[in-house]
Each structure stands twice: as structure tokens, then as C-alpha cells.
Image (tube, rainbow, N blue to C red):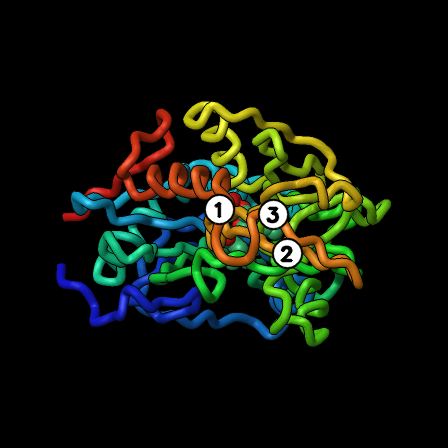
């Protein structure tokens, strides 16, 4: 199949309507068989559960074109499992894992013309999501749901690509103890929009949320987990049950240990120790691993020794290893890569 006329090297992380998307409806206690559709619009009741009480969850994963032209996805099984947890937490029916994985493949196969070719650093981002679709006016779970997946070609999440970013410690909380921080639900993101509108977005590319209970420990950003590198090249990441268990972070920690021979630690990280780190990075599917050069704690600026010009050396090694696996140039651990055969 030919490719669309897209400037692959200058893609941003933004929406584009592609040809086909997957949709399946849940009614009377079961999912229908699902289908691909060209219709990018969702039509539902004005009183749909998602519109009134935000009953929705989602995922994000990417497809990559390898140098030898194969199309692969990275650990899609973990996205299916995480969406299962999100759905259960919001009292939504689970979309079965096998069907989730099959639907991802169908969306990729139907939109091959939008899959960025190898060599541009661009990828095809897939967004599975599910929402309560029937009228709900008393506060309770919906009875009917829709599961959809669309895909879009994307470039870097942050403008400037691999340039270090500035992160600001946020005065508002992202997730409450015993709340929804560990699941991927739209409501977590909706409340983060408020702090985005405080006029800082030009100066600070991202926010660092602290734990809501004590406001002394690092949690995560609005869309990614944090990694830190110590003077002894130990990779440290926050341990918290109110952050999203990032697939990228879990993968990077494994690769640090088993591919790069680095020690890793998941533990509570206090704001007061931020000055002691050599490097910092944000990791997520959209973000990949983005270097952080500066953390702003109100009047105090914490400048990471790795600086504002380029990625720190350990972050770079991690980035190269992770993206090497994702683009198929490095051998992946067993079961991490799934190849999609397109006829
Ligand atoms: N944390 C939040 C709040 C996110 O939205 C994301 C993005 O999915 C991540 C972390 C990173 O998770 P993953 O690496 O699984 O994409
Ligand atoms: C992802 O990385 O897939 C996310 O969902 C994060 C979002 C902020 C784009």
C-alpha cells in the first residue's frame, strides 16, 4: 500500500483523522463482534454516562516501522491489562485482552498508509478508549459502553524533540491517596487542565506532581513517570501507589539492569533530595524518554548537571536501548515485540 503525502520528519503529537478506526458496543451484558469504520464521529445520548459523570478510560501505545520494513508494537499486552484494571475500577465491563490485541492489529493494518516509514523517528500512536454511552442521570455506572481505537502518525511529544525540558513543581494535586492515580482514566487528566491554564505553559513544559498526603515526595507529571540518575549511576524511580504504572518506565528499569548493567531502585523520592541527582527524565509512550534539565520549585531552580543542551549520558543510553528495541534494531526481551502481518 502506498503512503499518504505526509511530512514524516515534521510531525507533532497532534490529532489527524486517519482512514479507519475500530468500534465495539457493549449492550445487554455483552460486547458485539466489533468492526472497522470510516466514521470518526461518536453519536450518543446527551445524558450518556461519560458526558455526565466522566465514566471513561483509555490507553496509549505505538506501532513502529523497522528498518527492514516490518511493523511492530511494543508490549501491547500490558496496555490491555492496564485497561482491564482501569475498567474494573470504574465499574465498566472489561474488553477482553485477546480482542483488544486483535483490534489494535486491525487498526494498524487498515491505516498502513499513515504508518511513518523508518528513519524519521515518527511512530503510529494508537488510542484505545472506552466510555459509558447510555443515559445515566442518577450517579451510577452506565449499562451500555463503547470501546474504540483510532491511530495517528505522531512526532515528538515536546516541541524540540530530545532537548531537555523544564518542569515545575505543581501546587495542586493530581491524585488522592486511595483515589484513581494508578489507573488511566480521563478524569485524572481533566483536573490537570486547570493547572495548565495558570499561564506557565510557555516557561514550563511539564508539571511535577507531589504526593497529595504530605506534599514532600515526587509523584509523576501529567502524562509520564519520572526517572532519576544518581552520581553513582543508580537509576531511581518514585515508588507510589497513586501514580500510573508506566509501561515505558517498567521497561526502562528492566533494560537498565539487564542490558546496561546498571543498578535500579524504586523508592520514595523526596523533593529535598532533587538537588542530589545528576540526570532526570520523563518516560511514557508519548514522551518516550524526555530529558529534564531544570526543575523549578517555586523560587528555587534546581539545574540538573546534565544541563539544558542535551540528554545526560545515562538517560541517552537508556533512550537508545529502549528505542533500539522499539524500532527493531536491538534484540528485544522475549515477548516484548509483536509483529503485525499486513497483506
Ligand atoms: N503517567 C501518566 C499520568 C500517563 O498519562 C502516562 C502515559 O501513558 C504515563 C505515566 C506513562 O505510561 P506508559 O509508559 O505506559 O505510556
Ligand atoms: C501516553 O503516553 O500514551 C499518554 O497517554 C500520555 C498523554 C499525556 C498523551
Q: What is the spatial separation of the Cα atoms under label 1 and label 3, in whole angstroms?
A: 55 Å
Label whose residue precedes the other's in the sequence (2 or 1): 1
**Residue 30 numbered tag:** 1
Return the residue nearer the eye: 193 or 249: 249
1 vs 3, front mark? 3
Residue 36 falls left or right of residue 50: left
Residue 233 spot, x, y in % from top left = 57, 31
> Which residue carries the number 3 mark?
305
Q: Label 1: state its secondary structure.
A: strand
Residue marked by disc 2:
294
Distance between mark 2 and mark 3 Cα atoms: 9 Å
Question: How many residues crowd around disc 1 within 10 Å: few (fewer than 14), some, or many (20 or more)?
Answer: few
Tell me how many marks there are. 3
Q: Is 263 on the left or on the right of 4, as rendered?
A: right
Residue positioned 72% across, 44% down in the render: 274
Q: Position of residue 335 (x, y in %)?
A: 36, 28
Q: Quadrant of the N terminus?
A: bottom left
| Residue 90, position as x, y percentages in the image | 65, 48
Secondary structure under badge 2?
strand
Sequence-wise, the earlier of marks 1 and 3 is: 1
Q: Nearer the viewer, residue 47 or 334?
A: 334
Using the rendered image of the protein, determine whether residue 227 is visible from the camera's viewpoint. Answer: yes
Q: Label 3: how many residues lie within 10 Å, few (<14), some (14-19) or many (20+)?
A: some
Amino acid at each position: 500500500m502506498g503512503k499518504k503525502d505526509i511530512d514524516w520528519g515534521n510531525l507533532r503529537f497532534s490529532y489527524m483523522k486517519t482512514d479507519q478506526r475500530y468500534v465495539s458496543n457493549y449492550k445487554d451484558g455483552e460486547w458485539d463482534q466489533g468492526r472497522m469504520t470510516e466514521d470518526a464521529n461518536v453519536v450518543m445520548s446527551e445524558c450518556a454516562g461519560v458526558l455526565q459523570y466522566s465514566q471513561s478510560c483509555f490507553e496509549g501505545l505505538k506501532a513502529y516501522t523497522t528498518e527492514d520494513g516490518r511493523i511492530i508494537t511494543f508490549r501491547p499486552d500490558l496496555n490491555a491489562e492496564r485497561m482491564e484494571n482501569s475498567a474494573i475500577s470504574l465499574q465498566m465491563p472489561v474488553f477482553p485482552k485477546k480482542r483488544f490485541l486483535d483490534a489494535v492489529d486491525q487498526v494498524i493494518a487498515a491505516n498502513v498508509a499513515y504508518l511513518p516509514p523508518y528513519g524519521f523517528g515518527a511512530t503510529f500512536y494508537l488510542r484505545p478508549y472506552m466510555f459509558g454511552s447510555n443515559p445515566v442521570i442518577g450517579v451510577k455506572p452506565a449499562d451500555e459502553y463503547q470501546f474504540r481505537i483510532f491511530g495517528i502518525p505522531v512526532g515528538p511529544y515536546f516541541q524540540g524533540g530530545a532537548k531537555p525540558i523544564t518542569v515545575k513543581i505543581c501546587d495542586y494535586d493530581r491524585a488522592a491517596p486511595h483515589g484513581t492515580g494508578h489507573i488511566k482514566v480521563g478524569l485524572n487528566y481533566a483536573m490537570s487542565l486547570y493547572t495548565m491554564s495558570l499561564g506557565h505553559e510557555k516557561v514550563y513544559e511539564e508539571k511535577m506532581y507531589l504526593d497529595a498526603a504530605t506534599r514532600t515526595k515526587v509523584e509523576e507529571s501529567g502524562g509520564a513517570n519520572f526517572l532519576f540518575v544518581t552520581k553513582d549511576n543508580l537509576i531511581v524511580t518514585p515508588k507510589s501507589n497513586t501514580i500510573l504504572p508506566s509501561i515505558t518506565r517498567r521497561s526502562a528499569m528492566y533494560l537498565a539492569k539487564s542490558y546496561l548493567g546498571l543498578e535500579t531502585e524504586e523508592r520514595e523520592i523526596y523533593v529535598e533530595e532533587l538537588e542530589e541527582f545528576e540526570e532526570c527524565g520523563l518516560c511514557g509512550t508519548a514522551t518516550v524518554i524526555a530529558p529534564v534539565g531544570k526543575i523549578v520549585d517555586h523560587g528555587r531552580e534546581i539545574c540538573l548537571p546534565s544541563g539544558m543542551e542535551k540528554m545526560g549520558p545515562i538517560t541517552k543510553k537508556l533512550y537508545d536501548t529502549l528505542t533500539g528495541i522499539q524500532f527493531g534494531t536491538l534484540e528485544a526481551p522475549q515477548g516484548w515485540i509483536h509483529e503485525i502481518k499486513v497483506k
